[in-house]
Each structure stands twice: as structure tokens, then as C-alpha cells.
Amino acid sequence: MNFLSPEQIQSLRAEHGTPLYAYDQRSLEEAAREVLAFPNAYGLTARYAMKALPTAAIVRLFSDMGLHIDASSGFEAQRAMLAGVPGEHIQISAQELPQDLKGLVDQGVRFNACSLGQLEAYGRLFPGGEVSVRINPGLGTGHNNRTNTGGPASSFGIWHEHLDRVRAIQEQTKVRVTRMHTHIGSGGDPEAWKHCARLSLDVAAQLPEVTTLNLGGGFKIARMPGEITADLQEIGNALLDDFRDFKRQHGRALHLEIEPGTYLVARAGAIIAAVTDVVDTGSEGYTFAKVDTGMTEFLRPNLYGAQHPIALFPGDAGASREEIDVLIAGHCCESGDMMTPAPGDPEGLAPRRLPRPIPGDSLVIGGAGAYCSGLAASNYNSFPQAPEVLIGLDGQARLIRRRQSLDQILHNELDG
Ligand SMILES: *Cc1c(COP(=O)(O)O)cnc(C)c1O
């Protein structure tokens, strides 16, 4: 949230109201340049995992910079194409087989089969066609079971010991597995990531037609003090020799793909909200600041116990306020709509030290670019979707998504 000055917060509030998402173009571009410079031995395609923040203006910005797209559903692939991304630049890795897979592939979209069933379905649609397979290499890196997407407790991908079944489907349908994919989870540490990359190379060695290896996303970003941001140069360089050894042993120069979501957008976003009420539960209790956002824009604390920086900007800037311990409560009638879970204990609460809040103050949540706008309990309690602005390199804010209207919430309802 460092990209927002107190004056800018005031003027954004005056123009767009709260709650409001604000994104910083400079930070987005910096992250994209780092991702595009990921070290590689034989070529790189970097994809933006657009589920992290799927708004068209963001997808277009990255696409214009040379990033391709990882889509999590057929709908997301369509959304990317509507934003202007060429079909050939999109790959789908989905839990659910897209209904119009044939139509999407005919538009150039690539498919990553995430189960044996999906591989078989693709093979039936495109006998002799080329496809990617997502492999679960037997290891995950998520910071908890909700963000882990590898290992025996994860349903994502084809279990690495089932390659015989992959071969059987290849023989049956004549489909050609020329690309392989792993994505073992979000927020993992670099050592686990490198270990997984090596396991993936071992699997690729057993799939003789594979010439592209996609190692997924999952590069950690520091949101809170003390957290560590993944060093892409360090991770990429550590893998160079593995790719070169692979070529010596197997005669294949593997093209590398990576597909970060978090890394590209997490720190480039903030949620601007207003304090609407302050209540307390007595001398043995807590002070709560109630704000006009919550799980409708910001579900991560509720879903994962996620920790985000939170800053209070007093409306009467300049007046000195004592700091007190405050819990931040969301605006939904839901006891779990709290933005201050205890670190490492999602069921617990941990007050933040903030200037004593007064209704009207601004509350800004940082690190809110990834999985906030795109992952929210939209319309719960009938709150409309919040607008989004992109702050350009010139410091000017452009509206990239309007606030939803009540009519839009009701649009599909019928008298019955
Ligand atoms: C979500 C996802 C990503 C991005 O993960 P981050 O942790 O946000 O980098 C990449 N690939 C696939 C297949 C995903 O589902």
C-alpha cells in the first residue's frame, strides 16, 4: 500500500467512494519484468495465472508486456480472449472440464489435462492432437492444506505413479503428450519449489514426447514484516544445470514455462475502506473497528487466516491519537467476517496496534492485489461488487471496474 499517499486516499475516496480496490501500474510492470527475466536454459514462456486478479485491464496490461495466460476454467479463457488475449496465448488448467472445450481449442487455446478423465476426453475430441498433462509429483508447498496443490492429500493433477495409465490413453486415442505441468501450491518456500522442479524433471524423463515443462506458480511474496519474497533469479539459476543435465541425458532441450499469479499482483493492490463504527466489549474484551468492507471484498483472512498489513489514516490528519489494540470487523452479518485473525491460528484473533479509530477514518488493507477482488464472497448480504482503479505511471487513477448497482445484483431474478 506504499504506493498510496494520505492525500491520494482522500481524493480516491471523494471520487469513487468506499470500499475501493486500487492497483499500482508501476508495481505490476516491475513484477512482470522480473517474471519475464526468469532464468532459463532453452527458452521461457511466462503465464499470468489470471484467477489472482481477472479484471480485463490487468489481463491486458500483462498481455501487452508479453505474458501469456493461465486460465482456471473455460470461462476464464473466454474472459481473457474478450480482453484481447490471443487464444494461442492461453492455456487452461481446470478442475472442471470446460463444456465447450472443442470450441476453445479451435480458437487456439491450449489444454492441460488435469486428470486421467480429462486426458481421455481430450484424446476423444482430438485424436492425434497435442496436449499437456498436469502431474502431481507427490509433494506440495502450500502454507496450509487449503493452498497446497500437490502431495497425496491434493486432488490436482495426475498422480505421478499413474504414468502407465497415461500411456494407455495415449495408445487408445493417439493423443500426444508434448507438454507437462506441475503446480504444487501457493506461498511455498523456494527450497520446496526447487525440489519439486527436480521431481518434475524425473517424471518428464518418462514422457518421451514432452518438450515443454511448466512448473506452475507459487512464488512467495512478503506481505507482512518478517516474511520473505521469493528470489526468482536465485530459483531460476538453481535449475539451469538440471535442465542442461536433462538435455545431456535425454536429448531434449526443454522449453520452460512458469505461471505466477500472486507474485505478479499481490503487492500492487490495496483496499481502501472507511471506518463506520467503533464498539467495545468492556474492560475484559476488545475494541472493534467496523469497516465498510469485509469478506465481500477480502475473504482471505476468513478462508486462510491470511495476514495483511492494515493501516489507519485518521480523518483529522495531524491530530495526535493514542495507539490502542483494535480488531477489525467486516460489514457482513457473519461472526467470521474478521480481518485480524491470529498469525498461525485462523480461529483465533489478534488485535492490531492502531491509532484509536473514529468513524470516517480511512482503513487501508495492503497486499490486496492477489485473490481479493477475484476471490470474494460477492453480493453476500447484497453488498454490490466494489469498483477498481488502476493508478497509472503518471499517478492518475483510472476506473477499470465500476461499482455494481442493485439492478445488476437482481438482474437474473424472475417472478417464477
Ligand atoms: C493458482 C494457480 C497458479 C498461480 O498460483 P500463485 O500461487 O498465485 O502463483 C498457477 N498455476 C495454476 C495451475 C494455478 O491453479
Image: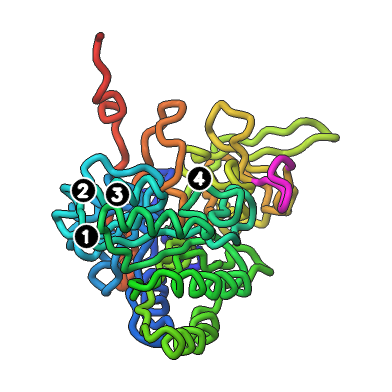
What type is the residue that disc 1 sits on? Gly
Question: How far separated are the C-alphas under marks 2 and 3?
Answer: 21 Å
12 magenta-colored:
no
User: Mark 4, mark 3: which one is toward the viewer?
Assistant: 3
Q: Earlier in the sequence, mark 4 or mark 3?
A: 3
Q: Earlier in the sequence, mark 3 or mark 1?
A: 3
Residue drawn at (38%, 86%) of the image: 251
Would you say the residues marked 2 and 4 are in contact, meaning their CB atoms lie under 8 Å apart? no
Question: How far separated are the C-alphas under marks 4 and 3?
Answer: 21 Å
Judged left or right of residue 287, residue 154 is left
Which residue does the numbered mark 4 point to in the structure image? 298
Q: Viewer-proximal residue, 288 or 141?
A: 141
Question: How far separated are the C-alphas under marks 3 and 1?
Answer: 23 Å
Task: Tell me if mark 3 has few (under 14), some (14-19) or many (20+) residues whose alpha carbon lies within 10 angstroms of its own.
Answer: some
Would you say the residues marked 2 and 1 are in contact, meaning their CB atoms lie under 8 Å apart? yes
Residue drawn at (59%, 64%) of the image: 188
In the picture shown, does residue 71 fall above or below 221? above
In the picture shown, does residue 98 fall above or below 85? above
Q: Viewer-proximal residue, 187 or 110?
A: 110
User: Mark 3, mark 1: which one is toward the viewer?
Assistant: 1
Q: Earlier in the sequence, mark 1 or mark 4?
A: 1
Question: How far separated are the C-alphas under marks 1 and 4?
Answer: 41 Å
Residue furthest to the right: 284
Tell me where residue 129 sits by quadrant: bottom left
Which residue does the numbered mark 3 point to in the structure image? 76
- Residue 399 screen position, x and y as percent: 28, 53
Which residue does the numbered mark 2 point to in the structure image? 125
- Residue 103 screen position, x and y as percent: 16, 48
